[in-house]
Amino acid sequence: MTADPSAAFPDLIRLIGDARQNALRKVNEELIMLYYHVGEYISRESAAHGYGDAYVDEIARFIAAQYPDLKGFTRRGLYRMRQFYETYKDDEIVSTLLTQLSWSNHIKLLARAKTPEERHFYIHLCIKEHYTARELDRQLESSYYERAMLSAKALAPVPVEKHVKEQFLDNYVLDFLNLPRQYSETDFRKGITQNLKDFLLEIGRGFTFIGEEYRVQVGGGDFYIDLLFYHRDLQCLVAFELKIGAFKPEYVGKMNFYLEALDREYRKEHENPSVGIILCADKDDEIVEFAMSRSLSPVLVAEYTAKLPDKKLLQQKLHELTRLAEQEL
């Protein structure tokens, strides 16, 4: 008998774990539907009889008296339930997805997502990435929606296929690094590896970290890739080259060299061609376009910022790009 019981009965552990997860998922589904129907009741009755705030107060007192152990049915909670129902009652796009999010995540979206498009985006993102409330709050704070929409409108370099480009942003927010005022590229790399969980939240959970300063051998020389990841959805290696200054055209040649080395010596037969991300503090889009115009490798150039972006500025930029696109159509 092994000293580790979980190693002796792996199938049994898996069955119990799956059952627990299914039970928690079912409880969450029932809870979300309860809140939805309570919100529907309050909304319908208030509209039919012209009830005001006193009506919600009366319901809150009734539930507190009848079900003293029932949490969340305060005056504030009941208003949130009504808002939840009224927000999604006619929204067929996500109506079947609502029970896949926790109530905590729904509360954050009701408070901070201002348009149906933004809510749809975060609902799908929460489901895909299995966000906790804290993780969703961070993405809302960092204007992830606006950055993703701006990235989608940016043209991809010719060798980069659309489904590859869609997995990456043009701008990453690395506010969690707590870098000093003056820092080196080594500090930058170490900051990322020491805060890898937060970095993976920013770039996406499809990534698996392989290593920093990853050594590749070409001829008689050793060369080092700043960060190397594997992307499960794209099924390819992803090399990150970190630069603390502005983008320079010569960075593309270096990245092409790394990708060629990875594809020749390290990529497995079933894997797709490797992708390179040059992460810079600043980039001029025209210079990037010229530098990438003759590149044959899937290389992307992205900016990073070490502080939270100005959400209003991003929204204005997104509105302007949307307006220009509509004019062209």
Image (cartoon, helix red, strand yellow):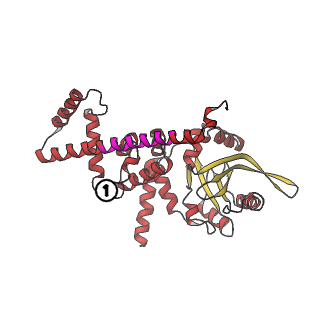
- Residue 284 is drawn in which quadrant? bottom right
Q: Which residue is mark 1?
A: 91
Q: Amino acid at mark 1?
A: Asp
Count how many numbered circles sit on residues in the image. 1
Q: Residue 103 placed where, x, y %?
A: 37, 41
Alpha-carbon neighbours of circle 1 within 10 Å: few (<14), some, or many (≥20)?
A: few
Looking at the image, residue 16 sits to the left or right of residue 70; the answer is: right
Q: Name the one closer to the observer, 27 or 177.
A: 27
- Quarter containing the N terminus: top right
**Image: magenta residue range:** 16-33
Q: Residue 153 placed where, x, y %?
A: 50, 63
Residue at the spot 50% in from the left edge and 48% down from the top edge: 129
* In magenta segment, residue 22: yes
* In magenta segment, residue 184: no
In this rendering, the answer to whether 172 lies above or below 17 is: below
Whether residue 242 can be seen here? no
